[in-house]
Amino acid sequence: DDEDIVQIKCGHILHIGCYRGLIGDKNWFRCPVCFTIVGVMIGDQPSGIMKTTVNKALQCDGYPPGTIIINYGMNEGVRNRIHFSGTHRTAYLPDTPEGNEVLKLLKTAFDRKLIFTIGTSVTTGMENCVVWNGIHHKTHTSGGSSHFGYPDPTYFDRVKLEMAAKGVY
């Protein structure tokens, strides 16, 4: 019966009961066929701030002078009766057209609570703390990809794919 199906934005067709089950009480879900985000994905990032400045003298290796500095300040808090610690992180983008494009995407991802989550730190092993949530950032201006810095010729493509997987385009 045509009244029992719904076509979603990626073109796939779902039974209305399946659609309701996927969306639940959220405003988004992932298509079970092609994994496209349908709706607007909202994460579980705790409260915090994202501030940006530009330093015209600072240089990311492999780019002309001019660097966007992103400062994140994530608050500590309590979730599910478990205390978690906050964090401060600094990241860098070259002040180029592509760097500014990625900055806009990162701001959208931050507003949608997708940049951080609560988990176990890969570097310290500490549990119940604010950690990155699968969208990689460059935390150094040099040192190459093995040191979370520049140069890294595929970084922009990879980080855009990571955000696209969360519905941020």
Image (spheres, rainbow, N blue to C red):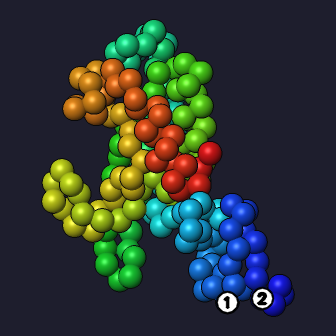
Q: Nearer the viewer, mark 1 or mark 2?
A: 2
Give the image location of residue 43, x and y in percent.
51, 64
| Label 2 CA crowd tier, 10 Å (few <14, some 14–19, many 20+) | few
Q: Earlier in the sequence, mark 1 or mark 2?
A: 2
Image-based side of 17 in relation to 106, left or right = right
Quarter assignment of residue 71: top left
Q: Nearer the viewer, residue 162 or 72?
A: 162
Side (left or right) of 28 relative to 120:
right
Residue under the image location 53 percent in, 56 percent down: 166
Where residue 8 is drawn, which disc sits there?
A: none
Foreground pick, 5 / 115: 5
Can the viewer see residue 30 in this picture?
Answer: no
Find disc 1 in the rendering and name its residue: 17
Please state the horizontal and vertical placement of residue 75, each as a whole percent of the image: 41, 59
Q: In the rendered view of the protein, which quadrant contains the C terminus?
A: top right
Q: Which residue is mark 2?
A: 4
- Residue 24, percent across and down? 61, 83
Relative image position of residue 123 (x, y in whole percent): 18, 50
Q: CA distance from mark 1 to mark 2?
A: 8 Å
The residue at 46%/62% (across/down) is 45
Q: What is the three-letter code of the residue carrying label 2?
A: Asp
Asked if the residue under mark 2 is in contact with the one under mark 1, i.e. CB atoms within 8 Å, the reply is yes
**Tag 1 secondary structure:** helix
For label 2, the SS is: helix
Residue under the point 55% across and 49% down: 164
Regarding residue 13, the answer to whether it shows in the image is: yes
Q: Residues within 10 Å of mark 1 (few under 14, many from 20)?
A: few
**Residue 45 or residue 71, whichever sits in front:** 45
Q: Amino acid at mark 1?
A: Gly
